[in-house]
Image (cartoon, rainbow, N blue to C red):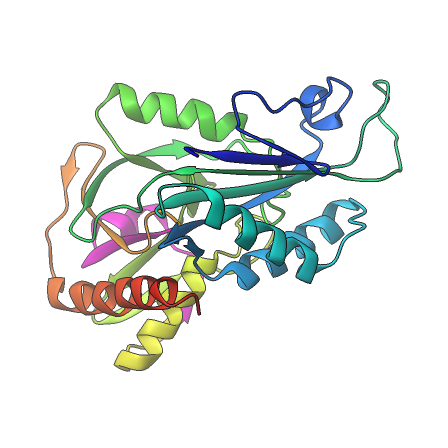
Amino acid sequence: MENLGYYNEEIDELQTLKIPVLDRACYFGDAIYDATYSNNHNPFALREHIDRFFESSKLVGINLDFSKDFLEDLIRNLAKKVDNGNQFVYWQASRGSAIREHYYKGKANLLVMIYPKDIVAMDTKYKVITLEDKRYLYCNAKTINLMPNILGSINAKKVGCNEAIFIRNGIVSEGLHSNVHILKDNKLITPILDNRILSGVARNHLLLACEKLGIPVQSRDIAENELYDCDQIIFTSSGGMCVGVKQINETKIIQNNQSTLNKLKEIIYKEFFDSTKYGL
């Protein structure tokens, strides 16, 4: 079949799967989610994403009454049923279903969606804009409250850009759906992990690639002006695993240290295709 969905033990194609209006995700956005991509029907770094999903549930107090093993087996089995092996794999858990009331404590609703989608090509370069970060301070929890990201995506699209970088008080937060890093003098600089940004799984794999190549990593705040004076800006996400930037706002980025970026890409993309090819 072309795509597949799961909701509380019901399995059907996405266009016919039904979710009750009393699901708190519908009227409050009271839910967490995570996502990855599949190649050859095998989701990449699935257990890492599931671990983060369970951490998000703890941060916002959503009661998951299933195990990590159950969720992993469910997602892997569903991914094998979709015809195209290159897939976007998404799952979320809302706090439950009830008449609209701010306080609620009950059983979570689990939703899984799988449909065909490719990761960003290895040679892609983004054009990006900067935006004021108006999001709230739960960015380390992967919730479905994404209105600022949606508006940012609309604004980026209007000016022909692929992504945007959120700036809070002159400091880089993250992208619309990516972590942001810079290369400067053959050193990778990545923002500090706190409640302003999500701890990205692809970010972790970038750091591992740096370790393999002997590239020093510094975790600290990145000032907005450093984006214009670095050798490379790098975005990492599940779909865009290691993507460079060719233009920020109206400024074209001088592509210094391209060889280092290419080496990082080679390691990261090879890991994706090798591990998903054999289901590792």
116 drawn magenta: no
Residue 231 falls within the magenta-colored stretch: yes
Camera-nearest residue between 86 and 178 = 86
What residue is shown at x 38% (from left), y 27% (from top)?
A: 153
Give the side of residue 159 with respect to residue 20, left or right: left
Q: Looking at the picture, how far across and down is residue 250, in whole percent?
A: 17, 32
Quadrant location, the C terminus = bottom left
Looking at the image, which residue is at 73% across and 17% down?
Answer: 21
| Whether residue 170 is visible | no
Q: Quadrant of residue 23?
A: top right
Whether residue 227 is situated above or below residue 14 in the rendered picture: below
Who is closer to the viewer here, 104 or 171? 104
Q: Is residue 91 left or right of residue 149?
A: right
- Which one is in front, 156 or 107? 107
Could you tell me which residue is drawn at 36 percent across and 48 percent down? 85
Measured as percent of width and height from the top left, residue 144 is found at 60, 34
Q: Is residue 127 visible?
A: yes
**Which residue is depicted at the point 44% across and 65% down?**
204
Residue 37 pos. (x, y %): 41, 49
**Rendering coords of residue 224 (x, y %):** 34, 46
Image-based side of 231 in relation to 82, left or right: left
Which corner quadrant holds the N terminus?
Answer: top left
Relative vertical location of residue 25 with respect to residue 222 in this rendering, above or below? above
For the magenta stretch, what is the residue range?
A: 218-237
Placement of 245 over or under 231, stated as above or below: above
Q: How many marks?
A: 0
